Amino acid sequence: MLAGADFLAELAATIRAAVNPKCNIDFSLQTNGILLTPANLDVILRHNIGVGVSLDGIPADHDRRRIYLDGRGSYQEVAKGLRVLASPPYRRLYRGILTTIDLDADPVETYRHLVDFAPPLVDLLLPHGNWSCPPPRRTPDEATPYADWLVAVFDQWYHAASPRPRIRIFEEIIHLLLGGASRAESVGLTPSTLIVVETDGSLEQVDALKSAYDGAAATGLHVSRNPFGDALRHPAIASRQLGVAGLSKECQKCPIVRICGGGYYPHRYRSGSGFNNPSVYCPDLKTLIAHISRQMTADLAPLLSR
């Protein structure tokens, strides 16, 4: 959004004109919401660009982490932009809300507050971290602070009587438990399907890999000399197409490997052994999956006994 709505519109129009018309291009952007004014959204609407907004819960929690340079919190401006986006003229552009889990925030209060903005989807993201640089309060033991947080939200969401948003991590785990394939990289064994084109034209892996070490996302490829097909043959990307065979020995032996999938790739990094490890969130993933599995088993038991 900092580039301006007109620039985004021109970019979308240029790409659509250059790509084979048989290809369906889905444009979307992720924003902090501050620049979601009617004027900007009118331009975005004309070019059918989807919009996701980053919001980290209630005002006090959001303003602890998302502040202006002068120290002011940004919640009020973000909330104003979200309300405009959720209004009837622009509702069809609304892709959802992205929230990074904050263990200091009350999970149920956070969930209910996000639901107040009527998002079609809520993405609850585990903070980026790994074995060499652990996320907050993720100690090298069997404690499960992130699972405990997510379980509280799951119970509230799953048993909600009123319309509820989709929550990606819960829906993906349920889908996997029912025998489906994952549609996201955070769980399951779905091959990596993403390439990032940086502003200088470099082709890189998912930008979350930058949380592991400097240069982790680099491929050495560039749009001026490499077709996208070259990226599929890059060793780092090819290794993420191997399913169970591409996981650590510990993960390969795990009974829930098809559900967990080793966790999100960037979260497996450890200095000295690279990404050949379980997720730093392994205990949390096991606990969350077990909780959802028990709920599904209880709900399906009457049907299976007929």
Image: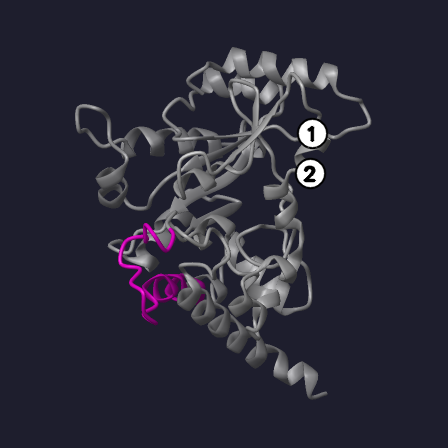
Q: Residues within 10 Å of mark 2 (few under 14, many from 20)?
A: some
Q: Residues within 10 Å of mark 1 (few under 14, many from 20)?
A: some
Q: Position of residue 43 (x, y in %)?
A: 55, 16
What residue range appears in magenta? 130-155
Residue at x 51% of width, y 51% of height: 265
Camera-nearest residue between 91 and 11: 11
Camera-nearest residue between 201 and 42: 201
Specify the amino acid type for callout 2. Answer: Leu
Q: Position of residue 46 (x, y in %)?
A: 61, 18
> Label 2 belongs to which residue?
232
Q: Are marks 2 and 1 in contact (CB under 8 Å)?
A: yes
Residue at x 69% of width, y 62% of height: 180
| SS at circle 1 | helix
Specify the amino acid type for callout 1. Answer: Phe
- Tell me the CA gap for discs 2 and 1: 7 Å
Seen in the picture, residue 287 relative to 270 is either above or below; the reply is below
Residue 131 forms part of the magenta stretch = yes
Camera-nearest residue between 251 and 194: 251
Camera-nearest residue between 88 and 40: 40
Tell me the number on the disc at residue 140: none
Q: Is residue 262 visible?
A: yes
Residue at x 62% of width, y 78% of height: 300
> Label 1 belongs to which residue?
228
Hey, which quadrant is residue 28 in on the image? top right
